[in-house]
Image: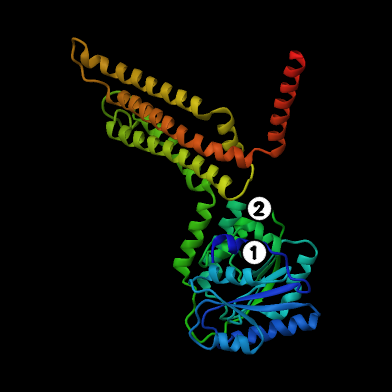
Amino acid sequence: MSSSNRDSRLRREPQRGIEVSVVIPCLNEEATIGICIRKAQATLERLGIAGEVIVADNGSTDRSVEIARSLGARVVHESRKGYGRALMRGFRAARGEFIIMGDGDDSYDFTDLERFIKPLREGADLVMGTRLKGTILPGAMPWKNRYIGNPFLSGLLNILFHAGVSDCHCGMRAFRRDALEKMQLQCSGMEFASEMVIKAAKAGLRIVEIPITLYPDGRTRPPHLRPWRDGWRHLKLMLSFSPTWLFLIPGILLLLGGGLVMMLSAGGEGSSPARPLSGDVHWAVVGSLCAILGYQVVHLGLFARAYSIIHRFGEVDRLVDAIFRFVGLERGLLIGAILVLLGLSVDAHALLPWISPDGALPNLRTSLWGVVLMVMGVQTMFNAFLLSLLGEQYQRKHVPSKDRHARSSLTVIHSNRVAQQSS
């Protein structure tokens, strides 16, 4: 199925008469899938809610599909492996206004659906279960996940994206269909859980968290979760969605730290206990390399922030907006040329003693400053071209329509004035 077809199926309106779709991802869950389906069906019936249960099979080789169909659940298949892919296949098949997801290993309580539905009816976009603020029964969660992995990753996600959730990996959550469209989910694996929270926060959706109980799962197979591999994938995703922490902050630290080391290494020949870096050419070389690297990493951060706005969300980014509005290609080239000329001047000054009649050795530490300025100047000129290419797409996506309308209105007014004067 093409991506356009998938998108159109996600955008369709909920089917009349179905309010809630319960989506359960499934990969060899024959021991527990029937229990989950029965609980969900009985709860929907008890609450008098028109709903459906969808099992998103991800290539089960046991009797999971047979059991699900025998109980009246609708089964859809996703041949490509991955937790996120299975869930997205189930979401595309869902016909309800609200979608509730939960694992099929009987660790989540599908008789607790009402507490997820109520906030959605009151206007919430995403309702997150939280195990860490609820109850975790003995044997339900490994200690390293409970006390190390989950609190660390959830805390980092809140620092980076201000989501305000305590358990970003909880597998039981609910959301509105229109919220799903706004989140534009894409991840294929376990990191899908973090992606949903990140994109909901970045899209400004209303997130509500409710404490739940986590039960020991009833599976007879090894768990699909691989803590170290999946933990790294969650961390990598968070950093890739936060260019400031991945690029800008490390780049600025490298740039400032490198410049500081170069300044501390300046001075006469040789160092002293009081000033251990003074006169040390080796430290000057290290500082210059750090400064050049940091300068380029800062530019990568600007590229990443612009790309994020263009291809993910149209959030306001004052730094990128100011660069595109007030720097641009021509000024970027001018700034780069000035840095190159300044570097050449510093280098020429450092080499003057060498070409003098005395034949003194050039000042290598001063010469390094010239080299750093020249390299940064060349980086600035080339980076200005790339930023200008991104800037064209940024302006089309990010400049408010009212500004574009204002500009077009000014053009019309100007044309009318010219026509009146000519008449």
Front residue (pair 224, 130):
224
Dot 1 crowding, Cα within 10 Å, few <14, some 14–19, many 20+: many
Residue at image location 56% in from the left, 49% down from the top = 311
Q: Earlier in the sequence, mark 2 or mark 1?
A: 1
x and y, in percent, of residue 37 in the image: 65, 84
Front residue (pair 122, 353):
122
Q: In this view, does 288 lie to the left or right of 218?
A: left
Q: Is residue 108 left or right of residue 188?
A: right
Return the residue at label 1. 10
Residue at image location 29% in from the left, 31% down from the top = 280
Return the residue at label 2. 203
Front residue (pair 20, 32):
20
Viewport quadrant of the C terminus: top right
User: Residue 327's quadrant in the figure?
Assistant: top right
Q: In the figure, 136 relative to 122: above or below?
A: below
Amino acid type, residue under disc 1 in the picture: Leu
Amino acid type, residue under disc 2 in the picture: Ala
Looking at the rendered image, the disc whose residue lies closer to the viewer, 2 or 1, is: 1
x and y, in percent, of residue 76 in the image: 59, 77
Q: What SS does tag 1 mark?
A: helix
Residue at image location 57% in from the left, 28% down from the top = 326
User: Residue 219's quadrant in the figure?
Assistant: bottom right
